[in-house]
Image (cartoon, rainbow, N blue to C red):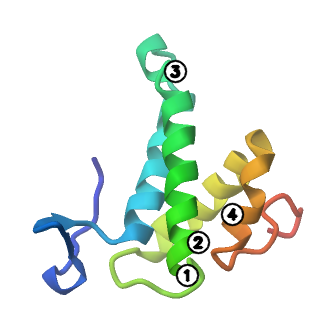
Amino acid sequence: MDLPYVEPRFIVNIDKFPCAPLALLLLHKLKGWDDRRNSPRSDFLAKIPGDVRDIGDLLRIANGVGLKLTKSKPYINSSFRELSYERVSEFCFEHEAYIPLWMGLGLSDPTDDGY
């Protein structure tokens, strides 16, 4: 799954269940969307609409709690962060309705050439 190590102090308990930090969950879901859309497998391609819905739901939650993706997170290395920004741009190119939600997380307009 290519998940990074997350120190226990960053694990969030929700209803007594340990959960990954929201920023990591969102960016990892975005990675899954990107992996699937670049796959030749029809079963992977069939899951893309669900990924888009999940990402939209996570974006709304992240905006609701005031998450800022521009702040450094110790469990997200610079390589994953840079690849994630590229994925955000590609996601927004295909799904323009989500641009304001990504911008709400502190990102500049991901459709700008300077992004």
Residue at the spot 30% in from the left edge and 53% down from the top edge: 2
Q: Amino acid at mark 3?
A: Leu
Is residue 77 left or right of 105 when viewed as pictured? left
* Circles 4, 3 touching at the beta carbon (< 8 Å): no
Q: Amino acid at mark 2?
A: Asn
Front residue of this view, candidates 13 and 103: 13
Q: Amino acid at mark 4?
A: Leu
Q: Amino acid at mark 1?
A: Gly
x and y percent of residue 103 in the render? 73, 70
Query: Secondary structure under badge 2?
Result: helix
C-alpha distance separating marks 3 and 2: 28 Å
Q: Which mark is residue 63?
A: 2
Please, is residue 60 above or below residue 57 in the view? below
Q: In which quadrant of the rendered view does residue 82 lie?
A: bottom right
**Residue denoted by label 4:** 101
Q: In which quadrant of the rendered view does residue 34 lie?
A: top right
C-alpha distance separating marks 4 and 3: 24 Å
Whichever of labels 3 and 2 marks the residue nearer the N terminus, that label is 3
**Residue denoted by label 3:** 45
x and y percent of residue 89 in the render? 72, 55
C-alpha distance separating marks 1 and 4: 11 Å
Residue sitting farthest toward the left: 16
Query: Secondary structure under badge 4?
Result: helix
* Circles 2, 1 touching at the beta carbon (< 8 Å): yes
Residue at the spot 89% in from the left edge and 62% down from the top edge: 113
Front residue of this view, candidates 85 and 15: 15
**Residue denoted by label 1:** 66
